[in-house]
Amino acid sequence: MMNNPLIAEFIGTAILLLLGCGIVANVNLKKTKAEGQTPWVLITSAWGFSVFVGAYVAGKYSGAHLNPAVTIGLATAGKFTWKMVLPYMISQLAGAMFGSWVVYLIYIDHYRETKDEKIVLSTFSTGPAIRNLKNNFFSEFVGTFILVFCIFFIASPNIAFENIETLNFGIGSLESLPVGILVWVIGMGLGGTTGYAINPARDLGPRIVYQLLPRKEKNADWEYGLVPVIGPLCGGVLAALFFNFII
């Protein structure tokens, strides 16, 4: 079953969100073992390791994009077939939704204890430290630009799709560690403004799950929700164009 790249993208992205959203839930929700333990290095480290684990699992089967911005960036650079872009993105979004939903089930008693909806939303989706949509967009754009641009120097031909002549460039098992480190350092250096979604599926999938939760005072903040979707997609495309220009 894992030989199907779409299933691999689903599973890899689900693992990424399960572990990544899990750390945020663990340090932010009421009455958890780690409540109040919120140094930024802990959260950024956990997200970097989550990327490493998800990419390691999916790498040899799909190239471990796990991120629509990476998928569309590779396609823009001519390193991935456009025929598979939408299926990959759907699998990534579904995986992100599933992974964040499992986090909710694991921490359901603690979600019930937590009354502050901003804290609850933060365990699913990102949000700005200072709300300025133009600057927030720029932060997500730059963070994703760095992510995708650097991935071009890490990714290699990974698998060939049946009945499609082009190869899938992506992240294999050996490349998953440097990509995890890359996400880690982006979070530490650039993540303080928006929480560094740098991945449309990572933010949109859990935000949809939050919207579906049976909570009376929920507010998914859809006005901001477009920023961590459009910003990363634009950053991924420009990174591809710039890479092709200089290489």
Image: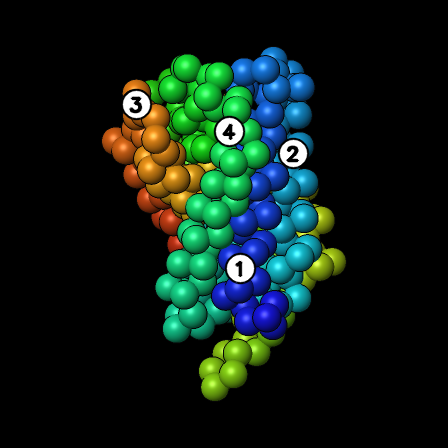
Alpha carbon separation for disc pair 1 and 2: 20 Å
Alpha carbon separation for disc pair 4 and 1: 26 Å
User: Of callouts 4 and 2, which one flags the residue occurring earlier in the amino acid sequence?
Assistant: 2
User: Of callouts 4 and 1, which one flags the residue occurring earlier in the amino acid sequence?
Assistant: 1
Q: Secondary structure at mark 4?
A: helix
Amino acid carrying label 3: it is: Lys
Q: Is residue 129 left or right of residue 187?
A: left
Q: Where residue 9 is drawn, which disc sits there?
A: 1
Q: Which residue is mark 3?
A: 216
Mark 3 neighbour density, 10 Å: few (under 14) some (14–19) many (20 or more) = few
Q: Is residue 159 left or right of residue 96?
A: right
> Residue drawn at (45%, 62%), measured in percent from left and top?
88
Q: Secondary structure at mark 3?
A: loop
Q: Residue 97: x percent and y percent? A: 44, 46
Q: Residue 132: x percent and y percent? A: 31, 23
> Residue drawn at (39%, 19%), measured in percent from left and top?
118
Callout in the foreground (3, 1): 3
Alpha carbon separation for disc pair 3 and 1: 33 Å
